Image (cartoon, grey):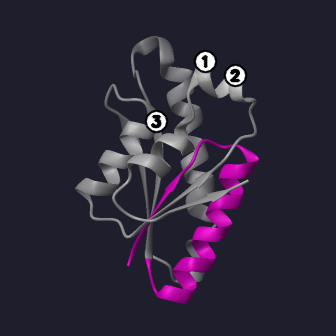
Amino acid sequence: MKILVGYDGTNSAKDALNLAKTHAEIFGASVDIVTSMQKGTEQQRDEIEQAERGLEYAKSLFENSNITCNTHLLIRGLSAGEDLVEFAAENQHDEIIVGVKRRSKVGKLLMGSTAQFVILQADCPVVSVK
């Protein structure tokens, strides 16, 4: 079994990591932790370094658990939701776990919702954590 976790450093994303660890232990699964950025130009270097540090932290949570864990920083020009759905399909993940941020309906309408996109578009089961 392969589990994908969308990680952006928020508290809900950290909760998603904890759930992924539990699922991986129960099902003997491997975990891929993914952070997505739309652009990766020189102006975003600080953001890229921050994302890399976040992925290092996320991976450290799995080091002592005998769970195979890989991290991926995706900079492919796609929205985070599109990146997660495509990465999951390309790598044949069995489950996606994403954190959900609380936003108003207007906020979701204007800004979109990564979790909502993943839930509606993914070919595999999606677990949302808030």
Q: How many marks?
A: 3
Residue sitting at 60 percent across and 41 percent down? 8
Q: Is 87 situated left or right of 27 in this image?
A: left
User: What residue type is disc 2 on?
Assistant: Val
Rendered view: 83 above or below 89: above
Q: Which residue is mark 3?
A: 80
Residue sitting at 69 percent across and 55 percent down? 14
Rendered view: 40 above or below 8: above
Residue depth check, mark 1 versus mark 3: number of the one nearer the observer: 1
Whether residue 104 is visible to the viewer of this picture, yes or no, is yes
Give the SS element for disc 2: helix
Where residue 112 sits, quadrant-wise, is top right
Residue 110: mark in rendering: 1
Asked if marks 1 and 2 touch (Cβ < 8 Å), the reply is yes
> From mark 3 to mark 2, how far is it between C-alphas?
20 Å
Please rate how many residues cluster around mark 1, counting C-alpha atoms within 10 Å: few if below 14, some from 14 to 19, many from 20. Answer: few
Magenta residues, start to end:
1-29
Give the SS element for disc 1: helix
Residue depth check, mark 3 versus mark 2: number of the one nearer the observer: 2
Residue sitting at 39 percent across and 16 percent down? 41
* Sequence-wise first label, 3 or 2: 3
User: What residue type is disc 3 on?
Assistant: Ala
Q: Position of residue 123 (x, y in %)?
A: 33, 58
Tell whether position 10 is magenta.
Answer: yes
User: What residue type is disc 1 on?
Assistant: Leu
Residue 78: mark in rendering: none
Whether residue 52 is visible to the viewer of this picture, yes or no, is no
Q: Is 45 situated left or right of 113 in this image?
A: left
Q: Which residue is mark 2?
A: 106
Please rate how many residues cluster around mark 2, counting C-alpha atoms within 10 Å: few if below 14, some from 14 to 19, many from 20. Answer: few
